[in-house]
Every structure is written in structure tokens, then in C-alpha cells.
Image (tube, rainbow, N blue to C red):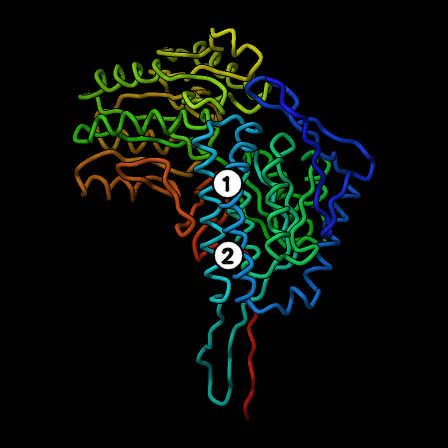
Amino acid sequence: MTVQLQRFKMLVGGEWKDSSNGLASSILDPSNNQVIAEVPRATKQDARAAVDAAKTAFHSPEWRDMDSAKRGRILTKLTGLVRENSDELARLETMNEGKTLRESKGDVAWAARAFEYFAGLADKIEGETIPVPPRRLNYTLKEPLGVTVHIVPWNYPIALAARSLAPALAAGNTVVMKPSEITPLTAIKLGELAAKAGTPKGVVNVVTGSGSEVGAHLVSDKDVDGIIFTGSDETGKQVMEAAARNVTHVLMELGGKNPHIVFPDADIPKAIKAVKDGIFTNAGQMCWAGSRAFIHESIYEGFVRELVDKTAAMRIGPGLEDSTEMGPVASKSRQDIVLGYVKDGTEEGAKLLHGGKKPKDPRLDKGNFVEPTIFENVTGEMKVGSDEIFGPVLSITKFKTTDEAVTMANETDYGLYGGIWTSNLKTAHDVASRLEVGGVAINEYLVTFPQTPFGGYKDSGIGHENGIRALEYYTRTKNVSVNLG
């Protein structure tokens, strides 16, 4: 099928622009590696121009003095525009990232809900009065940070853009959004919708380009007041080093190696489905993917047999096809990385139960497909048991006691998310309290809401997105003391 090539521009200071050097990058459909779009290949100068535009907009009375309730109404209008354009956004997301259209529609719906949630909070960001020694009035003001830079990853382009854009705008900040160089299309469309919703010029800027040039400049710019980064822990450390030179606020989500723990008294069919979906949704390209499963020895054989059978029956294909259950990984380099981990796993002694290679279907030869893969006999010393693979690879391990399961689950440098499967409330709450993670799901998996905090322990990040507490990051606290004597 021939796809009409779309040419996009980037949004800087309310104007749609090409890059200052006139260069463009080709955007590929990962299901066949066909070029579907071209976007500007921005330069450091373009990044600087976006920061300047955001800084000017931040100090402009049009935005600075805007009634917070009006900011909320703008976000409410943006909510409606995202919903009105949901079909187009979902198709763009699937064509650009590769996930199934069903998943993309869910991501767009989640993005709309994030804007809706923070729209309602825009006029509820409040200071407080503080009792102090007599004849004084002491109070706090909550003020926006200023210019915030949003480095958006490629695995959930629209959902994770909305997750940080919504609270940033609700709090009165101005934004420079830098989407991944391989999945920029829905971020550009989001910039268009934000402008239509009534954000003044320069409040929302979208700059497309490489992380090594554009991203590196943005996180090093002295006029940037906050950095929101989602990505690998190694890149996150580089961002922190750059931010430290200017003492810039950072909010980071840096991945995970997330465990399921399945006890004998669990709803087994439900747990099997969730373990499967928790790793093979979006081809495993999720920070919160359930990439490790610890199964009690008494149910192990039947559980694994059924899981493998259901995995083998999955239909792999282009995300736009209704019958597809798992699409491709997002790039050729990601395909190579995932297959490299499969090779490592077999060499280290893990037993491959299913998958581990490119699909045989010749229809899929040109795409970045990897079969859904399951290993057993995996230990924490193996790469497949310790590294964040970011692909459709599940490691399964048998356990005898609760203490053993918790110890193995915590045997990782990451601490983002975890799943517990049991009908015993005492066991559920006990294990939840002992897991070294920022979020726990009991008897379900892959669940988060705009109103619930999401963040990690250990190497999985700093701070929390979502929920009222997220506004703490996007604001500064100023204390005012008035002597009434």
C-alpha cells in the first residue's frame, strides 16, 4: 500500500517553521520501514529560538496575568479537540510507533483525560497561611517554574506528552516539547491543537530533531527552569549532569524491570492473561512492562504451559490491521537489540520456551517484528533477568516461599512497578509493602490514571507524574512574611 508522504513543520513562537538549515528527517512506519513523513531536523539555533519564545511568552502579561480559571478553560478546550481528532491521532500514533490501533486509541483517550483532569486543577493551586510569632502575617505563594523542557520518549508519544504538558500548563508554565526523533508526529499535532485551544503564541513550542543535538542543548540551556525526561537510566544520568550545571529542576522516569508475583490462590486465568498482556502490549516497549514473572511452584507447570499456548496463538502484524494483537518494535535498531538479548539469554543458560526470532511470515520481512518471547530458568545475574530489554521478552522463575519471591523481585537496580496475584488480602498488602517499587497493582496489571501518582524507586527515576502531587514539581513555593507591628 502506498502512503502519501506528509511534510510537517515545527512550532516555535506561534509560527510553523522549517529548520534553520533547511534539513529534514524521514519518519518511518516500523511495520514496513516505508517513509511516511518528513519533519524538520532542528539545530541548536532552533532549540535556542524555542526557549527564547517560551521565555518571552512566560513573561508576557497575556499568559503571566491570565486568570487561572481561564487556563483551565483552555485545557478543557484542548481536551475536546483531542477527543474530536482522536481517530487521526490514533492512526498517526500507530503508523509512527507501530502499536496496534486499539492501543493507540487507548493512549489518545488517556491523553484527553489527563488534560481534563489538570484543567480542573488549574484554579485550585493554592498557598497557605502559617502561624508565626505575634503581629505578623506569614503566607506562601505557589508560582510556576517558568520555561519547562519536555523530552518525550518514543514508546508512548501522545500519552507521555500529555502527562507532562497538562500539569505544566495548568500551573502557568511555558513549554518546549522535544519529541523523539523517530516518533514526533502526534506531538506536532498536539502542538497544533494547543494553539487552536487558545494558548498564546510561544506558550507551547514543539521542536523536532535529534537528542544528541537538540535535546542536549535544551537540557543545558541556562534559561530553562525545569526538565521533564522519560527514557533510559543512562541518558537520564547525562540529563542530570547537564541540569546540575545550571541547578535546573528535573523530573525523571527512567525505566523498570518489573515483577509479577503469582501465588497459588490467584485467579489463574486472569493472571495468565495479565502476565501475557503486561509484557506483549506495545511489543514490550514500556517502562512498566511486566518483564519478570515469579510463579509459585505448586502452579508453575500448568501456568507456564497455558501462558506459552496463549502466546503462541497471538497474531503479529501491522498495527493498523484489526486482527493484529502485537505490532512491530519501533525501529530496526530496537529489533537488533531485542534479538541480541535473546542470544545472550540462551548463552547464559536460560531456557527459551517460545519466540526469540523474527516471524516467518514473509509479509512481515520488511518490518521490525520480533516474536513474543518467553524464557524460563532465569536468574538475576543474567542480562535477560537484570537489564531493561524494552521489547517483547518475558523471564519466568519458580519460587517456593513469599520471602524468596520478594527477594528475587527486589534483586534489581530498578524499582518502578510490580504486580501481585492472590486472593489473600493479608498476603497482598504484606508483599506490596515489601516491594521496592513506586507502584503496585494487585490482581490487575498495566493500570494508571491521571489522578494517581506514577514514579519509581532506585534507578527508576526522581519524582512523580500524575495526580495533585505532580503540581509540586511544576511550581515554586515563595514565602512572604509581613510585620504588622
- Residue lying furthest right in this view? 21
Q: Is residue 351 left or right of residue 3?
A: left
- At horizontal 23% and vertical 40% (from top left) the residue drawn is 428
Question: Is residue 464 in view from this perspective?
Answer: no
Q: Which residue is mark 2?
A: 76
Which residue occupies the foreground of this view, 8 or 121? 8
Residue drawn at (56%, 33%) of the image: 92
Image coords of residue 299 (percent x, y): 19, 21
Q: Quick one: 475 or 331, which is closer to the camera?
A: 331
Q: Looking at the picture, how far across and down is residue 192, in whole percent? A: 63, 46
Residue closer to the observer: 189 or 133: 189
Give the residue drawn at x 73%, y 59%: 56
Confirm whether residue 320 shows in the render: yes
Within 10 Å of the Cα at label 2, are there few (<14), some (14-19), or many (20+) other Cα atoms?
many
Residue 94's spot in the image, x, y percent?
A: 52, 29
Residue at 83% from the left image edge and 36% from the top image edge: 21
Give the amino acid at mark 1.
Answer: Ser
Classify the position of the C terminus by image quarter. Answer: bottom right
The amino acid sitting under disc 2 is Thr
Q: For residue 141, which numbered disc appears in the image?
A: none
Q: Nearer the viewer, residue 343 or 7?
A: 7
Residue highlighted by disc 1: 86
In the image, 457: left or right of 85? left
Spatial CA span between label 1 and label 2: 15 Å
Q: Residues within 10 Å of mark 1 (few under 14, many from 20)?
A: many
